[in-house]
Amino acid sequence: MSSLLGYLGLSLLLFVIGAIGVCIRRNAIVVFMCIEMMLNAVNLSFVTFSKLLGNLDGQIAVFFVMVIAAAEAAVGLAIIISVFRNVASVETSDAAELKW
Amino acid sequence: MTFMGFVLAVCAVASGIGVIGFRNPLYSAFSLVANLMTMAGLYALLDAHFLAVSQVVVYAGAIMVLVLFVLMLLNLKVEGGAKLGLMRAGLALTAGVLILVTGLKPIMEHFSSVPAITLRENATKTVGDVASIGEQLFGRYVVQFELSSLVLLIGIVGAVMLAKRKHVQLAPRSVFGEAE
Amino acid sequence: MFGLFVLIVKVALVMNLALMLASLCTWLERKGSALIQDRVGANRAGAFIESDKWFLKPFLPAVRMMGWLGVINTLVCDSLKGIAKEDFIPEGTSKFLHAVAPIIAVLPIMLAFGVLPFAPDFTIFGHHIQAQVARIDAGLLFVLAMGSVAVYGVAIAGWTGNNKFSLLGSLRAAAQMISYELPMGLVFVALIIVFGSLDIYTIVQKQGELLWGVVPQWGIVMQPVGFVILLLAGMAETKRGPFDLPEAESELAAGYFTEYSGMKFLLFWLGEFAEIALFAALLALLFFGGWHIPWVTLPEGVWWAALLGHFVLMAKIVFFCVLQIVIRWTLPRFRYDHLMNLGWKMLLPLSLLNLIGTAVLKVAL
């Protein structure tokens, strides 16, 4: 058994925690944060595999995930703010209408 | 996993549970910051030095500050208690357990069969320092790198467009009423 | 085992250095502001001390001198006052976060000191010693990262204050710190292009060389525009000088630490002065050649050369501390929109142009 197995297990556990959070939380910002956590869990396994396989491709992938996460944060929070302006709430169940 | 790694892992799981457990979204955000910091520590343990530092810069320094800003500006009330239905919680837990099982199975099957020695030998070879990551980014992945800058640009423009308040053009009005 | 011992000693020394510089800045601020405003300043506590004890006699003149200079007042009396004061916690807020915020505000700054080299490497008793706690190859990036983490202390402090002044102050502080981080980072990138490394030690060593055999290759020579931008951005980053809007006392009481008292307040104070010292050290290391004396080459790896280099570096750091304090007490405060305009419309485009110019020159030459 490699000592790196623990990291993979941790990555999986964090992914699951994030997924449960996405399911049970209603606050859109918290849901967004849970998604970030899932992305991070996947990043951790990327880095672990990069170390395991002895090349840097995994770390490059993590770098790109970070870039996308930054762009996603900007756009996602802008969407949440504009929803908040219209329905005065960030609860996911309150923004159920398709048009207003 | 070294002792340091174990401590960081425990912190990561605890703060991860904190993110979904706290009623107040602000506390969730602070737990997520702690979680991201422990992740940076784990990256450093895995010899991904550049990623560890950029994790702190990008996630803790930029993304979470943005989230914190939004939370403070919206000044949200604490999420109402007892709304979480048993049905929903049960479904979420089931989904979580299913993901856990499907993920755990290949890890156990695949990696328990690989001899530890070969893994260790490989493991000492890569150190993600700035120079080697830079060579990869500006060598093999240069097109993707440039494209990612384009994605960021689009993200900025999109965020500004979405969050911009539409200015209501007030009709010029005379101070003395409607007469004119 | 020996390595661990050396590491612990190094951490203790660097912490000591940071705190000494911070307290020196505190004293300079007290006496310097008095000098600038044509006041006398702190000069009473301990200035008239008397004692009949024979073992205290020889120290009395020195103590009286320190009292006259205000050292005892700033370093002993103020901290005793801080310890003795009531620890006030506002109602309806998280006690935990309220207590943690000052620590979070100070910790990253202390951590950032860990990657700064304070003398060239030397060999003593057959051991090769690096005068630096951690030589990580992304040192400059680490300093930037710690600067961005420091935002949290401010944000949490403002939020736990549970009043409008605190929240407004912390929002201002966070916006200001984020805005001025961008030009700062871009100046760092230009420096990296010039010196070809993110490791601060390598950057300093490169500055010992001569440019075309004439001028020392200091950062100020290679990056004059970058220096001006970094000076402005750094002053805004420390939330002092003309950029002290987050704590503008005429508008916001004391900004984000309105609700803090006693030692917690002093921790913020300490963090602020440690940040001044950190920034002064960065300027000295990145732009003014660190431990190098122009046109003088000291032998490498000898302990007395390292010691001399250390003193040269400390002199430069103290100079920049004084410079920041003089600027802070000379210039009036910015207006908020002026601050944002300066950051986003002046410094950011300027630093981008500087970066492009540097890159073009690097390729062309």
Image (tube, helix red, strand yellow):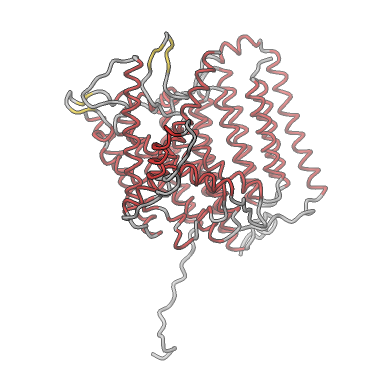
* Residue A63 in the figure: left or right of residue C92: left
Residue A25: percent from the left, percent from the top? 70, 48
* Residue A67 in the figure: left or right of residue C323: right
Q: Residue at x 67, y 28 (%)?
A: A10
Q: Residue at x 67, y 54 (%)?
A: A92
* Residue B12 in the figure: left or right of residue B62: right
Task: Residue lying at the far right in this picture: please name it.
Answer: B86
Residue B80: percent from the left, percent from the top? 74, 56
**Vertical side of C28 occupied by B164: above or below:** below
**Quadrant in the picture for the C terminus of chain C:** top left
**Vertical side of A21 occupied by B161: above or below:** below
* Residue C274 in the figure: left or right of residue A87: left
Q: Nearer the viewer, residue A62 or B25?
A: B25
Query: Can you see residue C181?
Result: no
Residue C132: percent from the left, percent from the top? 43, 24
Q: Nearer the viewer, residue C35 or C257?
A: C35
Q: Residue at x 36, y 38 (%)?
A: C280
Q: Quadrant of residue C318?
A: top left
Residue C110: percent from the left, percent from the top? 49, 35
**Quadrant in the picture for the N terminus of chain C:** top right
Query: Can you see residue B108?
Result: yes
Q: Residue at x 22, y 22 (%)?
A: C296
**Vertical side of B1 occupied by C324: above or below:** below
**Vertical side of C128 occupied by C74: above or below:** below
Q: How many marks?
A: 0
